[in-house]
Image: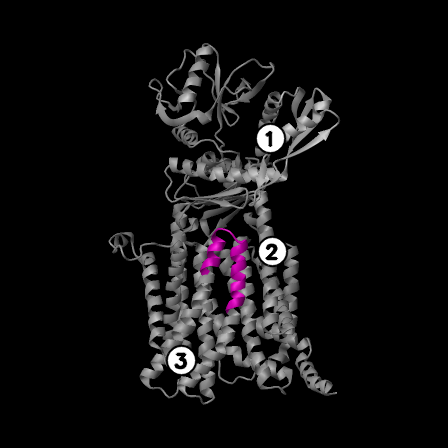
Amino acid sequence: MKNSLWKVMTYLIVIVIGVLIALPNALPEKTLAGWPNWLPHERASLGLDLRGGSHLVLEVDRPSLENEWLQTLTQESRTSLREAGIDFRSVQRQGGSVAVTITDPARRDAARDELAKLGSGVPTGIGAGASELDVSLRGNDTVLLRPSEAGVTYRMSNAVEQSLEIIRQRVDQVGVAEPTIQRIGGDRVLVQLPGEQDPSNLRALLGSTAKMSFHLLGREGEPGITMIADEEGRNYPVQDRVLLSGDRLTDARVSFEQNTNQPVVSFRFDQAGATRFAQITRENVGNPFAIVLDGKVLSAPVIREPITGGSGQISGDFSVANANTLAALLRAGALPAKLTVIEERTVGADLGGDAIERGILSGLIGFALVVGFIIVLYGSWGILAVVALALNVILTFAGLTMVGATLTLPGIAGIVLGIGLAVDANVLINERIREETRKGRGAYAAIDQGFAKAYSTIIDSNVTALIATVLLFWFGSGPVRGFAVTMGLGIAISMFTAVAVVRVAMIAIVRRRKMKVINIRPLVAIGLIRDGTKIDFMKARMFGIGISAFLSISSIILFITPGLNYGVDFKGGIQLEVSTREPADLARFRSGIEGLGLGEVALQEFGDRNHILMRLERQPGPETAQTEAVEKLRSEIVKIDPTAKVERTEVVGPKVSGELAIAGITSVVLASLAMLIYIWVRFEWPFAVGAIATLVLDVTKTVGFFALTGLDFNLTAIAALLTLVGYSVNDKVVVYDRMRENMRLYKSMPFRDLINLSINETLARSLYTSATAFLAMVPMAIWGGSAVESFAVPMVFGIFIAASSSVFIAAPILLFLGDWRAKRQKQQQLAPATASE
């Protein structure tokens, strides 16, 4: 029981380094600017929900990519056969394939071998794998070329990689600071742009393919003519033949016409492009000429004279913003394939600042309540636990800074809840030390035995919470992942602050004060739970199970009708948070928006009369239909009330909503199974069955709470359910751990009495831990705001449910499973007799 110097110095070094890394997060910019260079300057980056900005997920449009590939394949097939000297009657598209009809059937196989060369092998890591093309024969004179699944996947992957660089260039062109651009999966790109951004400009900037080409105009009805419209809806007979493509452009800038002062886009070609452009304009003086971008005519001027300088300009009814966007698109180059915005979330900077204030305020109040409660429970020894909690928060911020994690509002909620759960270790240790003191042990022996007996319980309870956290990070996204990171760091760091540091500090205090006995007394003369309680909990087991069954059945009925209030995360569609200067006129907003023909509209006051939550059902049609409806909404909102401001926008397409729903359900199921396995391994099968049966009842009641209150059931709600799963099992593990210990100590005690004894011995810990978690979360539930409402409010409810179910549900289930303990002892007694025979 001596503190070695190296251990104390190691702990001090870790703490000092952690404080220095975390300190920049608490310093203002001016102070940090004068900070010495040799000290850390990095801060934990803030999520978009705290600083404002836009979050978009773009997906490579597979039909568009396949369509363009088939067009190219048609041209390449003709060229390949001509070069090989193989005559053909026709090469044409047929659905998702290209059909090549050979003039001489005897050369069909030769044509097949030649055309097969158009599909290169898809790399598999050890060389070329499957071909990009499936080549087959039809009849005696036709070869069919179809893109293979491996080929499409490979080309989509390449398209994402090329798109990443082009998107970075486009974002740089418009001067957005600190963008986040990264790949998600095989066919998606995540773009996060901080600050106040116009979503319509962002979609135009990121979603446009920006493939520009130059064509001559012909006459409608002639072969090789396609009618293409401009922005005004005027149609032009455009020749299919591309005279010059936009990849020859080297620059594009916005300028203004001298006569009209209207913005135009001036462009310049490279040397080869300038030569070709001069030739085209020289040969077609007096002819109309179309500039086409992404299937729309930008401009259709008549060539008045040869243009030999290698430059030109695009004029039209452009606004300055549109002209700047077009110039940026042309400078950055064309995307290899069309990208569709399938998810969009935008938060105003003002709302982000308000979220920071709410998060800090509710976090500080929660911390203060926990601190006060701990000091009331343990007096002067509670101060040591408070210091450990403060270190836990500081080192959590240091961890966030070191790993480059993003702090979100749910992340702040994770830190707050982590404070409540970190107290659990301190409560377990202090209660164990008090027990050892009551047995007559001296100060050092009580500390030694207290920490030793509490350690396995702390490990088991923390592992169950970490299982839920890991799955939440794995299946979650955005702010929910931020919650998982902070929660996980807080739990892991609490093992250092609440166990290692507190142990060293306790030993040092006892040694310095030369204590013979360590007395951990409450600040208030009468404790909340008296020592040596002997409540017969099993006597009320039928009543407890009856109440639980009634609540769970009621919850199932509420789940069926009226059902859950699914958020846009799971339903898809559009959700906007609108603020107005004066109290909002809901009837006026409803009538105006219903006139847009966007389907059913749900409006409700949100927080106060100056805020409206507006929801629209998922729009029919492709993914783009969701984002197109947003522009109509924004325009109509300003018409209805010029003072209205859209603070937050969420647009989730049907594909993403389905994926999120599956991921949410999967994460809850896997968390439950993982904990079942862990408890089965650590304890015995009846404990696992009791914990999971209780867990199902706890989750059922929480789902019923969502249905009853009408709270949004979204990704944040899934975070609440997963956290509740971890917390509920955490609570059961403490009781089970004491049962396991008592089973070794009191081998002849009736099982019912042993269960009652174990519950009474852990009653103080269970109630104190639940109270601290409750006190930590209540301020977040009251003042945390909309972003954490679906997490904090049900967690407050869930903490109460989990605490009561540990006593009145989990333990009786063990009793109902039968006294397997007696059967096991009997088997153990029979085993030696059988062996001797």
Distance from disc 1 to disc 3, alpha carbons, whole Å, reads 84 Å
Tell me: 105 left or right of 568.
right
- Give the residue type at disc 2: Thr
Q: Nearer the viewer, residue 761 or 238?
A: 238
In this view, 94 is above or below 521: above
Q: Which mark is residue 666?
A: 2
Dominant SS type (magenta): helix
Question: Of circles 1 and 2, which is in front?
Answer: 1
In this view, 716 is above or below 587: below
Magenta residues span 462-486
For label 1, the SS is: loop
Q: Quadrant of residue 709?
A: bottom right
For label 2, the SS is: helix
Q: Residue at x 35, y 86 (%)?
A: 515
Q: Which residue is mark 3?
A: 524
Q: Nearer the viewer, residue 643 or 666?
A: 666
For label 3, the SS is: loop
The picture places residue 412, in percent across and down from the top left corner, at 43, 58
Instruction: Please say whether residue 526 is visible from this viewpoint.
Output: no
The picture places residue 196, in percent across and down from the top left corner, at 39, 42
Q: Quadrant of the N terminus?
A: bottom left
Q: Which of the marked residues, 1 or 2, is nearer the chain's N terminus?
A: 1
Residue extending farthest to the top is 286
Q: Is residue 195 magenta?
A: no
Q: Residue at x 65, y 68 (%)?
A: 549
Question: Of circles 1 and 3, which is in front?
Answer: 1
- Give the residue type at disc 1: Leu
